[in-house]
């Protein structure tokens, strides 16, 4: 998912240029503000999906390394530690300092993000880095404003509440937005005074590790942030089941989210925040700004090569404008430039891995076999590359695999509908409930339809409009809890009620 995922704010010139990375500096495990080799001595490679070339080898954390990191985070959380004694405003200053350092290293971080994920460099620079820095600054501002209430209670009692940190917070980060999702989890956790143990995705660990160096440079006390590159079944599972981890936040697939919730229940009933899959509906009414709807729904379908939990994968178009919508969508998709992610002209890069590429191509083939009309794309670009053409299907039926399964690739599915109530019922006919969108010039209709849609976010006449101030999360199997905004603070703090018996009353 993208934060403010639009290219409209990218200036025509001069454009920033990626830096040359001769050697990746930070490839080790970051614990207690120091770099460590893995307990097992194992490493794993990370690859550039645009070329298939190995970038470097990274230390592989496993259960023993998780134990060390949790011990470090727990020590940083002890009462009387430098982190626990620190003024709330000082925590905010540290987050601002980290944001300043990320501004300084913005070109390098954007280059590393593009090398590791394959997303276009300008998107990394203007969208991912911008969203990451804004998230840090937003929660830096919250650090000294998290407070309780004075409550009127019966008889001669006085009661007040205070908010305290949860403790050691684990975070398991996805590969599609590695740096942005790191900040979505770390920033509110630190704002509330917690310590964190973070596992970046094994496909994309490089920006997280570079941020580790910036955390130390910014002056965070040892143990407050620990970064463990590794694999889900080992390092991720160890975090989810650890008895001294008090909360875990995860962004990724619904299947893995279920495993994490199970591990929490079987260990210490740790808090769990889950941001999971989506099969997100857009409802396009005949009275909409048609070209705007075409552009916004395609931004939703194809941004980040379709590798977004917010992907606009089900577009319901009112019957009277259906043919024109499909025609304009075909013309609009031709503007997408597929190519080298480091080229400023490129707007569409490769998929993340061969395994993911094969899954997307299998779903595209299923669409053809089940009778959807392939209007554009549908093919790989090159025999050995991970590039897939932006793909449009029309005539999609609700029971098809491409209509029910999360594709997580550059595939737009266009349906038709006759009546408003029909569109709402079909939009809600999903196990998922992450985001949705409504395109209409009638604000009455927009508000009534948005009230009926079973999703955590509804966009009206826009798509992927995400901001640090706005809560984000899903209904149903799209997850539990909320990230971003003031709402995220509740996920990282405990509320304590203190009640005092007064000795006398007046």
Image (cartoon, rainbow, N blue to C red):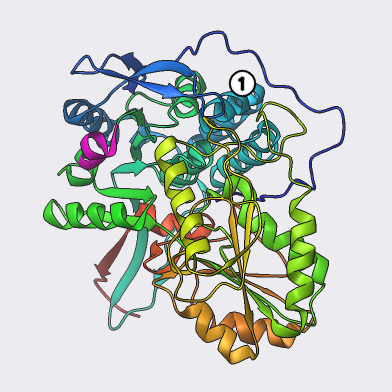
Front residue of this view, candidates 49 and 203:
49
Residue 303 location (% of width, % of height): 63, 49
Q: Name the residue tied to disc 1.
A: 108
- Is residue 170 shown above or below 72? below
Asked if residue 233 is among those painted magenta in the image, a careful observer would answer yes
Residue 174, horizontal then vertical, whole percent: 42, 42
How many marks overall?
1
In the image, the segment drawn in magenta is 231-237
Instruction: Report the residue that reaches farthest toward the right.
Output: 13
- Residue 41, quarter of the rendered image: top left
Mark 1 neighbour class, 10 Å CA radius: few under 14, some 14 to 19, many 20 or more? many
* Residue at the far left in the pictured view: 266
Q: Determine the secondary structure under disc 1.
A: helix
Relative to 263, residue 105 above or below: above
Q: Residue at x 28, y 83 (%)?
A: 155
Image-based side of 436 in relation to 182, left or right: right
Q: Is residue 482 above or below residue 324?
A: above
Counting from the top left corner in percent of width and height, residue 368 is at 53, 62
- Residue 199 visible to the viewer: yes
Quarter of the picture holding the C terminus: bottom left
Foreground residue, 271 or 366?
366
* Residue 466 appears anywhere in the view: no
Give coordinates of residue 167: x percent, y percent.
Answer: 28, 44
In the rendered image of this protein, does residue 159 appear above or below residue 1? below
Q: Can you tell which quarter of the image residue 383 is in?
A: top right
Q: Is residue 441 left or right of residue 269?
A: right
Q: Residue at x 51, y 55 (%)?
A: 364
Q: Which SS does the magenta portion mostly show? A: helix
Left or right: where 315 falls relative to 24 = right
């Amino acid at each position: 998912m993208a934060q403010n995922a639009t290219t409209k704010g990218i200036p025509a010139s001069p454009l920033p240029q990626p830096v040359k990375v001769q050697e990746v500096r930070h490839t080790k495990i970051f614990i207690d503000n120091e770099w460590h080799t893995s307990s097992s001595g194992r490493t794993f490679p990370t690859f550039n999906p645009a070329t298939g070339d190995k970038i470097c080898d990274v230390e592989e954390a496993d259960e023993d390394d998780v134990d060390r990191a949790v011990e470090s985070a727990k020590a940083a959380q002890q009462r009387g530690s430098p982190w626990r004694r620190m003024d709330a405003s000082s925590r905010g200053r540290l987050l601002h300092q980290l944001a300043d350092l990320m501004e300084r290293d913005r070109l390098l971080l954007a280059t590393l993000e593009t090398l590791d994920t394959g997303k276009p460099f300008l998107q990394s620079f203007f969208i991912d880095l911008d969203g990451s820095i804004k998230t840090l600054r937003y929660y830096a501002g919250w650090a000294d404003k998290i407070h309780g209430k004075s409550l009127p209670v019966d008889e001669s009692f006085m009661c007040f509440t205070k908010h305290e940190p949860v403790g050691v917070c684990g975070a398991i980060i996805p590969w599609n937005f590695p740096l942005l999702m790191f900040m979505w989890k770390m920033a509110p956790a630190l704002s509330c005074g917690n310590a964190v143990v973070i596992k970046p995705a094994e496909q994309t660990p490089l920006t997280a590790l570079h941020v580790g160096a910036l955390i130390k440079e910014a002056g965070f006390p040892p143990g407050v942030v620990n970064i463990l590159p590794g694999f889900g079944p080992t390092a991720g599972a160890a975090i989810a089941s650890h008895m001294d981890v008090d909360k875990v936040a995860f962004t990724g697939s619904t299947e893995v989210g279920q495993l994490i919730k199970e591990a929490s229940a079987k260990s210490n009933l740790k808090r769990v925040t889950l941001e999971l899959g989506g099969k997100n509906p857009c409802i396009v009414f005949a009275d909409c700004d048609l070209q705007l709807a075409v552009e916004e729904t395609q931004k939703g379908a194809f941004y980040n090569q379709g590798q977004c939990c917010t992907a606009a994968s089900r577009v319901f178009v009112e019957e009277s404008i259906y043919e024109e919508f499909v025609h304009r969508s075909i013309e609009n998709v031709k503007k997408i430039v597929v190519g080298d992610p480091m080229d400023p002209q490129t707007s569409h890069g490769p998929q993340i891995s061969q395994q993911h590429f094969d899954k997307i191509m299998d779903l595209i083939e299923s669409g053809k076999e089940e009778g959807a009309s392939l209007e554009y794309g549908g093919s790989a670009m090159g025999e050995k590359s991970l590039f897939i053409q932006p793909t449009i299907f029309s005539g999609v039926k609700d029971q098809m695999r491409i209509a029910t399964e999360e594709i997580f690739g550059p595939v737009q599915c266009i349906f038709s509908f006759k009546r408003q109530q029909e569109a709402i019922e079909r939009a809600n006919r999903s196990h998922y409930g992450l985001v949705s969108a409504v395109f209409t010039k009638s604000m009455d209709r927009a508000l009534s339809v948005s009230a009926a849609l079973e999703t955590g976010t509804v966009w009206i006449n826009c798509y992927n409009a995400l901001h640090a101030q706005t809560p984000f999360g899903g209904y149903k199997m799209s997850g539990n809890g909320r990230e971003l905004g003031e709402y995220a603070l509740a996920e990282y703090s405990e509320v304590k009620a203190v009640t005092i018996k007064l000795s006398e009353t007046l």
